Image (tube, rainbow, N blue to C red):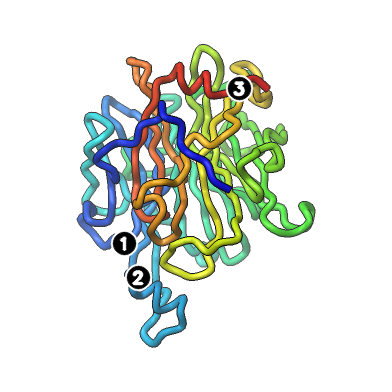
Amino acid sequence: MQYTTPSFLKRYEGNPVLSAKDIPYDASLIFNAGVTRYQGKYVMAFRNDYGSTEQDWRNYFSGKPGGKNTFKTSIGIAFSDDGIHWTPGPKPVFTLEDDDIIRAYDPRLTAIDGRIVMCFAVDTRHGLRGGIAVTEDFEKFEIMSLSSPDNRNMVLFPEKIGGKYVRLERPLPIYSRGGGEHFDIWYSDSPDLRYWGGNHLLLGAEQVPFANAKIGPAAPPVKTPKGWLTTFHAVAIVPQELPSWHPDWHKIYSAGIMLLDLDNPTKIIGMGKTPLIWPETPYEKIGFRGSVIFPGGMILEDSGEVKIYYGAADTVECLASADLNDLLAFCEPV
């Protein structure tokens, strides 16, 4: 399976825009960040896996002496005036402390109602949960909800629809989908960010030509005159082993894009039939997990430029951009 990124999408020539070397505290892998605009600045919440070096991981996976899997995870914050050059904060901003919770990670940011809503994943000793927290200052976070296992990749729309908050999510059904990683994108809504229902299947993995395994939400949707534009991640399992820090890696993660109806976002009205971003550059193809693209933020500028922020190879955070009209045209009617 092989694709190419369409020519209208341009990777930032200075990629990556954020990596471990930029962080003023212990950091190894900086990726899967959520990005939005808030109070006149661009703000990024990023995942930081730390505590194990590349050689630690290689030794661990190969069974060599000295190998260790001692990584931990925090969520850090960074700010920017232009959406390109970032200044990280002096310390992590979000952790969860509970006897059952192992770590929180993969933040997604949405500015709504004059505050920031952060969706995130939570590993616990009894399953994988999706969380929602709100903040106004990135210092104090109020936890609004934690889902039942297993659910993750939640992203919140930037305005209410029909008087309710709306999100996309990716449950992880194993037995009911016949085993394996056949996961899909679902829709749900809430009156208050705490209680969620109204569940609908939005997109099945079998509907994506460039995926033969799971799919899931990526960056929170942006509103356009034609509909809600939103990215998703798609996974293709390939027979050949791919370059990675650990052996036996056979997954290619790419970014897709689709257009949802403005008034009824459970209805897909357009979708790219090929990937929007396919891993092609060295920083996308080589790293902790090679050949991985995972968007977590998308910003529509007044100029019509759309900035797409994505984790690359589960190692660094990158930026690509395109004109809104090109993205809309790429979403073929369905």
Q: Which image quadrant is residue 205 in?
A: top right
* Quadrant occupied by the C terminus: top right
Q: Which residue is mark 2?
A: 52
Viewer-side label of 3, 1: 3
Decide which of tag 3 and tag 1 comes sooner along the chain. 1
Question: Pointer 1 and pointer 2: residues touching (CB < 8 Å)?
Answer: yes
- The extreme top residue here reads 225
Instruction: Tell me if residue 23 can be seen.
Output: yes
Q: Which residue is mark 1?
A: 28
Q: What whole-number distance in Å separates the C-alpha atoms at marks 3 and 1?
A: 39 Å
Decide which of tag 1 and tag 2 comes sooner along the chain. 1
Q: Position of residue 270 (x, y in %)?
A: 61, 23
Q: Residue at image x 47%, y 42%?
A: 278
Q: Quick one: SS at disc 3? A: strand
Q: What whole-number distance in Å separates the C-alpha atoms at marks 1 and 2?
A: 7 Å
Say which amino acid is labelled 3: Glu
Q: Which image quadrant is residue 137 in?
A: top left
Q: Quick one: SS at disc 2? A: loop
Q: Residue at image x 55%, y 60%?
A: 250
Say which amino acid is labelled 1: Ser
Decide which of tag 3 and tag 2 comes sooner along the chain. 2
Q: Which class describes the residues within 10 Å of circle 3: few (<14), some (14-19), or many (20+)? A: some
Q: Which residue is mark 3?
A: 332
Question: Quick one: 87 or 304, which is closer to the camera?
Answer: 304
Q: Position of residue 253 (x, y in %)?
A: 52, 49
